[in-house]
Amino acid sequence: MKDNLVQEQETLKNGDENGPLEPENERKIGSSQGDSAELGLKVSRQRLRVGVLKRNEHLK
C-alpha cells in the first residue's frame, strides 16, 4: 500500500480514474477555498458588530 502523500502526488501528476487533472479544476478548488475564507471573515465581522452593539446597549 502506497503512502497517502505519495499517492496524492502521483494523482496530481498523472490524473485520476476520470483522466488528467486540468488546471481549471485546480483554480476552482482554490477559488472555493478563497470564497470560504471570505465568507468566514464576513461572519466574524458580523458577530463582532453584534457583540459591540449588545455590549453598548446599557449606554442608551
Image (spheres, helix red, strand yellow):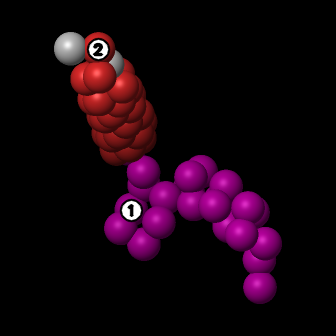
- Is 57 or 27 nearer to us in this picture? 57
Circle 1: is it few (<14), some (14-19), or many (20+) Cα within 10 Å?
Answer: few
Q: Which residue is mark 2?
A: 59
Above or below, 10 relative to 28? below
Kind of residue indicated by mark 2: Leu
- The residue lying at 36 percent from left, 25 percent from top is 55
Considering depth in this image, is 54 or 32 the residue closer to the camera?
A: 54
Dot 2 surroundings within 10 Å: few (below 14), some, or many (20 or more)? few
The kind of residue on which mark 1 rests is: Gly
Q: Earlier in the sequence, mark 1 or mark 2?
A: 1
Alpha carbon separation for disc pair 1 and 2? 63 Å
Is residue 19 shown to the viewer in this render? yes
- 48 or 16, nearer to the observer: 48
Say which residue appears at 78% left-offset and 72% top-offset: 3
* Quarter-of-image position of residue 44: top left
Instruction: Magenta stretch: give its range.
Output: 1-22
In percent of width and height, residue 33 lies at 40, 39
- Split into 4 quadrants, where in the image is the C terminus? top left
Identify the mark at residue 19; answer none if there is no mark. Answer: 1
Q: What is the secondary structure assignment of the residue under circle 1?
A: loop
- Identify the secondary structure beneath mark 2: helix
Residue 6, placed above or below residue 39: below
Answer with left or right where residue 9 lies relative to residue 27: right
- Residue extending furthest toward the left: 60
Rendering coords of residue 37 (x, y %): 41, 33
Assess whether residue 18 is covered by the magenta stretch: yes
Could you say which quadrant of the image residue 23 lies in?
A: top left
Q: Residue 51: percent from the left, percent from the top?
A: 35, 30
Residue 34: image location, x then y, percent: 38, 31
